[in-house]
Image (spheres, rainbow, N blue to C red):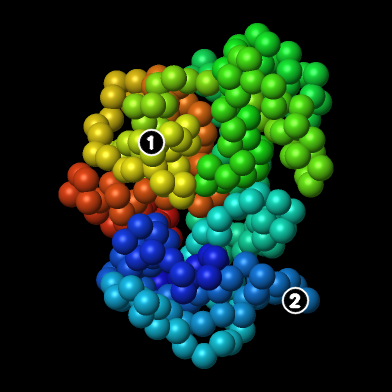
Amino acid sequence: MKIAFQMDPIGPVDINADSTFRIAEEAQARGHELFYYTPDKLAFQEGRVTARGQDLRVQRVQGDHAILGEMREVDLAEFDVVWLRQDPPFDMFYITTTHLLDRLAPGTLVVNDPFWVRNYPEKLLVLDFPDLTPPTTIARDLDTIRDFKDRHGDVILKPLYGNGGAGVFKLTADDRNLSSLHELFTGFSREPLIVQKFLPDVSAGDKRVILIDGEPIGAINRVPAAGETRSNMHVGGRPEKIALSDRDREICAAIGPLLREKGQVFVGIDVIGTYLTEINVTSPTGIQELERFDGINVAERIWEVIEAKRA
């Protein structure tokens, strides 16, 4: 098959951690042809969805991991699969790319389905499952957020459309910084904030569970660095081997059918203690860590699902 990757610049990626690199590596091993472009090179031109990018070969040599051809323009309708893999922030630029990629259906399979990526951003889809999630409020109004904090004591405050642990704050019951943080966030963004009851279990780790076509494949535990509340690996969280618990499987059984129905092939959910906190559909990570810990080929399973869909 002809496979295109819409992703952030490939040059700086860590080949031992990056999930997109691992997906591309497995596709190449299976005989598929690879093409790479960055989201700013996506365009709609007189009825065609096009991209300017380069043919790609990958190899597991850091610093020489991407062998790129000459820059050229392609019609994405000529590809079998397009991967939507750029990182958030989930802003209007990101949303616009999903609208353009929508136009490739049904001839080209876009993974994950861009219509539902647009409608199911990570911190909003969990609202469909209130029995699985901690107390949560989404608001821009300071009084609403303050009332939530007064009810629940220690809370986590973060941007609604952020990623990688950026801008995440723990506020204790007696913390006096809420107004200042609200001024900071609303000063540069019109987006709401999300505030959740703080879960002390995060000290033992924030579990990332990988689902392929709605089925749980395995999990890794991300343990915060000393003195940190955030467990994201982008900010120093340490990945550890961990098994799926009965509660993890219960959560996956509740959300899996919806993910499968909406074309969300590769999803990573976040579980703290017994609570679901995020359903990551935009650009989830964790494949390589899970493969090393559990000795399984997650990327192979992803491609088996995609190849079956194309067949």
| Residue appearing at x 65%, y 43% in the figure | 161
Q: Is residue 34 above or below residue 237?
A: below
x, y percent for residue 20 = 42, 61
Tell me if residue 57 can be seen. Answer: no
* Local secondary structure at mark 1: loop
| Residue appearing at x 67%, y 60% in the figure | 97
Nearest to N terminus: mark 1 or mark 2? 2
x, y percent for residue 112 = 52, 52
Q: Is residue 186 above or below residue 309?
A: above
Say which amino acid is labelled 2. Answer: Gln
* Side of 186 relative to 281 (left or right): right
Q: Is residue 266 above or below residue 130?
A: below
As drawn, which residue projects farthest toward the bottom?
Answer: 70
* Local secondary structure at mark 2: strand
Say which amino acid is labelled 1. Answer: Ala
The N terminus sits in image quarter: bottom left
x, y percent for residue 254 = 44, 25
| Residue appearing at x 73%, y 21% in the figure | 145
The alpha-carbon separation of the residues under discs 1 and 2 comes to 51 Å
x, y percent for residue 69 = 47, 88
Q: Residues within 10 Å of mark 2 (few under 14, many from 20)?
A: few
| Residue appearing at x 36%, y 31% in the figure | 205
To which quarter of the image does residue 183 belong? top right
Identify the residue position indicated by label 1 in the image.
Answer: 226
Identify the residue position indicated by label 2 in the image.
Answer: 45
Q: Is residue 18 above or below residue 285?
A: below
- Say which mark, if any, is on residue 206: none
As rendered, which of 29 and 295 lies closer to the eye?
A: 295
Tell me if residue 67 can be seen. Answer: yes
